[in-house]
Amino acid sequence: MTYAEKLKDPRWQRKRLEILERDGFKCIKCGDTKKTLHVHHVAYLRKTEPWDHPSSGLLTLCETCHSRAEYTTERFKELMCKAGKRSIDLMAAILSCDSEYAELCVSSLMTTARSK
């Protein structure tokens, strides 16, 4: 099953609705309720279906904030691969660029780690 097919699966649709309801059907970053809302996986867990991720690792973001989050994540991965030993300094610099999103991710990941 492709990832696009998994997002049409009733199990993902139920999980998505649960997260949207939890977050009040608004972007948790900017508060927008008019734009298309996405449920963002803060981190993908290997061999875990989208609907089996813990709710604490899922965030409601509007289309714009989701695009920014995805770009920031991909850019971060690229730079971390290149950074080597300087990765801690680089991580601090990147996270300072979008501290609100960084705080959301760290909080979400900490909650996910505690629930395991």
Image (cartoon, rainbow, N blue to C red):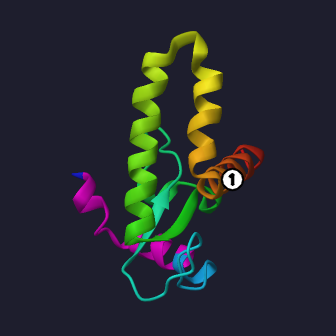
Is 89 rendered above or below residue 109? above
Residue 31 spot, x, y in % from top left:
57, 80
Q: Residue at x 39, y 40 (%)?
A: 74
Front position in the image: 25 or 98: 98
Residue 68 inside the magenta-drawn segment: no
Residue 112 spot, x, y in % from top left:
68, 50
Q: Residue at x 48, y 87 (%)?
A: 33
Q: Furthest-top residue in view?
A: 85
Q: Residue at x 38, y 48 (%)?
A: 71
Residue 76 spot, x, y in % from top left:
47, 35
Q: Furthest-right residue in view?
A: 114
Report which residue position mark 1 lands on. 103
The segment highlighted magenta reads 3-19
Is 104 rendered above or below residue 89? below
Q: Residue at x 61, y 78 (%)?
A: 23
Is 84 rendered above or below residue 40? above
**Where, quadrant-wise, is the C terminus in this rendering?**
top right
Q: Total marks drawn?
A: 1
Q: Furthest-bottom residue in view?
A: 34
Let me know if residue 1 appears in the view: no
Residue 56 spot, x, y in % from top left:
65, 59
Is 29 rendered above or below residue 100? below
Q: Is residue 32 left or right of residue 6?
A: right
- Label 1 element class: helix
Let me know if residue 37 appears in the view: yes
